[in-house]
Every structure is written in C-alpha cells, then in structure tokens.
Image (cartoon, rainbow, N blue to C red):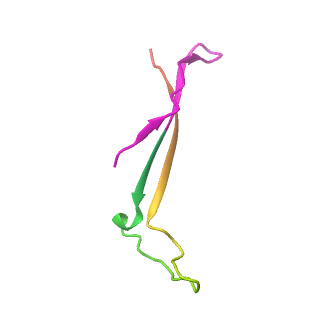
Amino acid sequence: MVLTVSDVTPEIKDPWGHAKRGMTATTAIDRTDFGIVWNKALEAGGVTVGNEVKVTIDVELQKVD
C-alpha cells in the first residue's frame, strides 16, 4: 500500500509555542484483501458495495524538543 501525501502546511507555532504542521495522506485498498466479500446484486444491475475503499488520513504533527 502506498500513501500519497498532499496539503502539507508550513510549520506554525501554536499559542503555547509548539511547532506544528499538518498534512493529508490518501490511498485505496481492496476490501476483499481483508476477507470482506459480502455483496448483494441489485435488480437494475450492479452490486451494492464496490471492492475499492478509499482511505483519507488527516494528520497534525507537533515537534518535540
């Protein structure tokens, strides 16, 4: 699995003087790789649940002195 990192913010100081930075990481996984295989066919065609699951992680980091 590869995480794509974007929206990296510049380092800022919070009101207590701690250096912080934020970013977003995204990826996609196949739910069947984790044994989740349930699905239901729809009357009009297709299925209820797709196999690809998109994952978004928002992170805030604080520098430790």
Tally the marks: 0
Relative to 16, is 32 on the left or the right?
left
The relative height of residue 65 versus residue 40 in the rendered view (above or below) is above
In the depicted view, which residue is nearer to us: 45 or 29? 45
Task: Give the residue at the far right of this rendering.
Answer: 15
Whether residue 13 is in magenta: the answer is: yes
Q: Quadrant of residue 2?
A: top left
Q: Position of residue 27 (x, y in %)?
A: 43, 48
Q: Position of residue 34 (x, y in %)?
A: 36, 64
The relative height of residue 24 versus residue 43 in the rendered view (above or below) is above
| Image quadrant in which the C terminus is located | top left
The span shown in magenta is: 1-24
Task: Give the residue at the far bottom of this rendering.
Answer: 43
Q: Position of residue 48 (x, y in %)?
A: 54, 75
Q: Residue at x 42, y 40 (%)?
A: 4
Whether residue 5 is in magenta: the answer is: yes
Relative to 16, is 37 on the left or the right?
left
In the depicted view, which residue is nearer to us: 39 or 46? 46
Q: Residue at x 43, y 53 (%)?
A: 28
Q: Residue at x 44, y 62 (%)?
A: 52
Q: Residue at x 48, y 34 (%)?
A: 6
Q: Quadrant of residue 33?
A: bottom left
Q: Quadrant of residue 37?
A: bottom left
Task: Give the residue at the far front of this rendering.
Answer: 44
In the depicted view, which residue is nearer to us: 50 or 14? 50
